Image (cartoon, grey):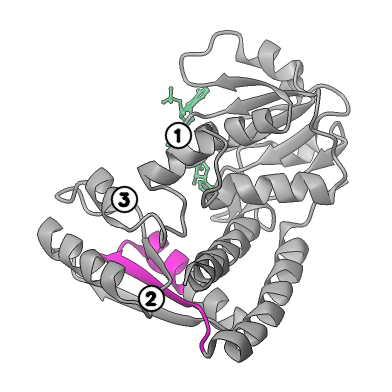
Amino acid sequence: MIISGKDLALRIKHDIAEKVKECEKKYGRVPHQVVILVGEDPASMSYVKSKGKDAEQVGFKGTTIRLPESTSEQELLDLIASLNADGGVDGILVQLPVPEHIDESKVIAAISHEKDVDGFHPLNVAALWQKNPCVNPCTPKGVIKMLEEAGVEIEGKRAVVIGRSNIVGLPMAKMLLDRNATVTVAHSRTRDLPEICRQADILVAAVGRLRFITEEMVAPGAVVIDVGVNRDPETGKLAGDVDYEHVAPKASVITPVPGGVGPMTRACLMENTLECFLSKMNRR
Ligand code: NAP
């Protein structure tokens, strides 16, 4: 079974668009999402463009602020402070990575946790680990929705997450753990990775290496979630961490790249923006 993140994301965005129409009636305005891009990294420019398009599709007010590479850390922090203080802004996102002269952790911490639609702010991260209400990071949130959509039972299953970044691997492991999977987190120093992977009922690859997960690393009937985004140097096309052609026949459920986790991450970003807007309106 192939889980199409593209189709599910379309449905989620459709539901959001319906709710946005009600926001307008009930609160007199629609959610406003601001995306900041510093510099001209081509991949970041394309991600920012997609986010703007998604915002438009669901009926949000979307603002993209493009700043030159030479923007100082203080200038960026000042801009974030002014957006935090602006009652008409509901979600703020700074496209990562930021240029090297800017401290990424300062930028993440500067965004008000109530407008942190990425779910990267330390208060949101802490709340996730303490099982308190919070903005869930978009990529693992999207993966959980895909598993639910495919009817995959998580409770009691052995899950292996490869990758331990703050934005994907760690929150992914925590969200599976909270749904009562038994979770192993693997990383670059893990020994016997193929053996560990073969024990997984649910295998999540978030490494960033083309065709890293081979057929031999996957147990028959496993659920395989491919978070990786890589460029195949031979074809120039996007491809995941999983050797899809050889792994797909062995897996019971698999996500493709492109068209899998990526679109779901973007849909969850829109959902987070709506959630930030609604919690603000309901706090009043
Ligand atoms: P990252 O910060 O570079 O983390 C990569 C992880 O892979 C690290 O934990 C690293 O281990 C581990 N790793 C590297 N080589 C390994 C090896 N040989 N064996 C086992 N583990 C290894 O990357 P990220 O931000 O988490 O992103 C991971 C991938 O997901 C990238 O391809 C990224 O583009 C993609 N991504 C996709 C989406 C989406 O929406 N589809 C969203 C975010 C990210 P160490 O910790 O030991 O270094």
- Residue 101: % across, % down: 14, 49
Tell me the kind of residue under disc 2.
Val
Q: Residue furthest front?
A: 284
Horizontal relation, residue 248 to residue 85: left or right: right
Three-letter amino acid code at the position of disc 3: Ile
Q: Is residue 209 visible?
A: no
Type of amino acid under label 1: Ser
SS type, badge 3: helix
Label 1 or label 3, whichever comes before in sequence order: 3
For the question of whether residue 26 can be seen, the reply is yes
**Pair 3/2: label in front:** 2
Does 255 appear in magenta?
no
* Residue holding disc 1: 165
Q: Which-is-in-front pick, marks 1 and 2?
A: 2
Which residue is identified by label 3? 108
**Which span is picked out in magenta?**
29-49
In x, y percent, where is residue 202? 75, 29
